[in-house]
């Protein structure tokens, strides 16, 4: 299947769409799905999707609404054509052609009826897809990648989503189309190609700097380029303060602190600590510098305090961590 054949395949009505077009209602068998509350959102089971592996790619069936639901797996929505209006955590979100929406597990969402020219691709993935080895292949290491990695792995709140504005990112769209050709075609080694395209797609998403997250409809909030704010912390982690950060982006300190907490799930202090420890871990693994020197270089004057928070983050003291990395341990 090539890209032209893919387009014809996606625009043609499948059997379910033909039924929904005729009946004007959702025909999926969801009656037996357990609900959080009576008449509330239903829990979508894993069983229909993962019979052939931990990644499943499908076209969303048009012409009928998808009721509010949630699930244990991670979902990536790609708007191939047209628009898609969803309710996500009670918020009205309109996704447009070329955009990508990444949903963590247990996010309650529903999809309004999509028309003839509206094509949504669902890429659903079990959490074990995102192993440590998978995430460690990202070239960048810092709180930006940490934020995105947390969004696609375990999240204690399980109420997060990210919308990536990918309209001008041609490489991403090419990767998406090529991924779908493998998923909907019949070529050999399709599973292997799908996994590698998924890696390329997530790597390309790391390059997308305009990212919108929960409650981004607020005008003041939408002006805040979260990735640029996080990049500033990443570059200035040694001596960055909330006051200096707020001044750089023309925000009130309290407002920006609350915004960071809501958008990332971490306070400003936690974000700075994360970046400092990432840098310390890299220095421990890749240099022979003294631990006291490393602690001071990332902004900690108290060696005892550095030892304590490093062990809390990595489950090992700095010396043990260094020895494990040198011996090839994980």
Image: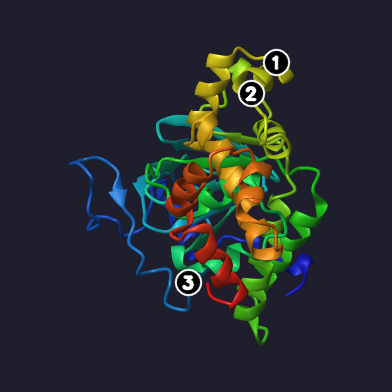
Q: Residues within 10 Å of mark 3 (few under 14, many from 20)?
A: some
Vertically, is 141 above or below 254?
Answer: below
**C-alpha gap between disc 1 and disc 3:** 45 Å
Marks 3 and 2: CB-CB under 8 Å? no
Q: Earlier in the sequence, mark 3 or mark 2?
A: 3
Quarter holding the N terminus is bottom right
Foreground disc of the pair 1, 2: 1
Q: Which residue is mark 3?
A: 54
Q: Secondary structure at mark 1?
A: helix
Residue 260 in picture, x, y percent from top left: 54, 29
Q: Is residue 1 left or right of residue 260?
A: right
Q: Earlier in the sequence, mark 1 or mark 2?
A: 2
Q: Nearer the viewer, residue 218 or 241?
A: 241
Q: Residues within 10 Å of mark 2 (few under 14, many from 20)?
A: some
Vertically, is 171 above or below 297?
Answer: below
Residue 301 visible in the current orientation = yes
Vertically, is 251 above or below 192?
Answer: above
Q: Which residue is mark 1?
A: 247
**C-alpha gap between disc 3 and disc 2:** 35 Å
């Amino acid at each position: 299947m090539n890209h032209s054949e893919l387009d014809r395949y996606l625009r043609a009505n499948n059997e379910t769409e033909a039924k929904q077009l005729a009946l004007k209602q959702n025909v999926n068998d969801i009656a037996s799905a357990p609900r959080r509350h009576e008449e509330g959102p239903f829990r979508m089971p894993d069983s229909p999707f993962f019979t052939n592996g931990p990644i499943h790619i499908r076209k969303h069936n048009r012409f009928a609404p998808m009721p509010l639901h949630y699930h244990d797996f991670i979902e990536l929505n790609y708007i191939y054509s047209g628009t898609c209006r969803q309710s996500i955590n009670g918020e009205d979100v309109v996704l447009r052609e070329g955009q990508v929406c990444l949903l963590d597990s247990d996010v309650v969402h529903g999809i309004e009826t999509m028309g003839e020219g509206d094509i949504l691709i669902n890429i659903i993935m079990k959490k074990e897809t995102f192993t440590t080895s998978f995430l460690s292949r990202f070239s960048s290491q810092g709180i930006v990648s940490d934020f995105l990695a947390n969004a696609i792995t375990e999240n204690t709140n399980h109420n997060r989503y990210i919308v990536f504005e990918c309209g001008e990112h041609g490489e991403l769209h090419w990767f998406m189309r090529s991924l779908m050709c493998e998923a909907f075609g019949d070529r050999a080694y399709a599973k292997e190609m799908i996994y590698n395209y998924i890696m390329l797609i997530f790597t390309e998403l790391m390059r997308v700097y305009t990212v919108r997250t929960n409650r981004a409809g607020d005008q003041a909030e939408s002006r805040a380029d979260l990735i640029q704010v996080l990049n500033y912390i990443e570059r200035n982690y040694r001596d960055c303060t909330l006051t200096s950060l707020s001044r750089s982006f023309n925000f009130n300190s309290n407002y920006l602190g609350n915004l960071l907490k809501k958008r990332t799930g971490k306070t400003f202090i936690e974000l700075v600590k994360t970046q400092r420890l990432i840098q310390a871990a890299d220095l421990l693994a890749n240099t022979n510098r003294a631990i006291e020197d490393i602690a001071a270089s990332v902004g900690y004057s108290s060696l005892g305090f550095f030892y304590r928070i490093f062990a809390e983050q990595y489950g090992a003291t700095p010396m043990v961590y260094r020895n494990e990395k040198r011996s090839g341990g994980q």
